[in-house]
Image (cartoon, helix red, strand yellow):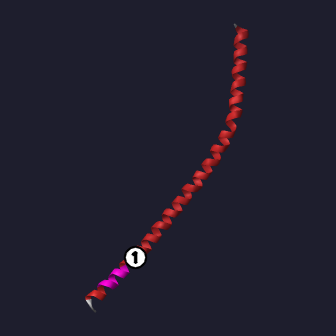
Amino acid sequence: MDLTLKTIIEFRDEVREFRAETRKTLAEHSHRLNVIGATIASLKADVGVLLSSVPVIDERLDNLEARVAALEARGS
């Protein structure tokens, strides 16, 4: 077999192996990115719930502060 042809065949085989490895690596990274995306979406939803409760908590704290101030005024 001609040396040039042999080299081309070997190179083609190496390129095939590289492409297969690259596809596998890209699939793994894609899966990891999908997991990260799902986690971010879940965290976003959790933060939304927390933020929706902030005004209620703030109002309750204001009411509590007013009650404590009234009790302190009576005690003075």
Question: Where residue 6 sits: x, y (%)?
Answer: 30, 87
Q: Quadrant of the N terminus?
A: bottom left
Task: Give the overall secondary structure of the magenta segment.
Answer: helix
Q: Is 20 located above or below residue 57 in the figure?
A: below
Kindly identify which residue carries mark 1.
17
Residue type highlighted by circle 1: Glu
Magenta span includes 12 = yes
Q: Is 64 located above or below residue 45 in the figure?
A: above
Question: Where residue 47 sits: x, y (%)?
Answer: 63, 43
Q: Residue at x 73, y 15 (%)?
A: 70
User: In which quadrant of the rendered view does residue 7 lie?
Assistant: bottom left
- Which residues fall within the magenta stretch? 7-13
Q: Residue at x 39, y 74 (%)?
A: 18
Q: Residue at x 69, y 12 (%)?
A: 72
Q: Residue at x 68, y 30 (%)?
A: 58
Q: Is 41 located above or below residue 25 in the figure?
A: above
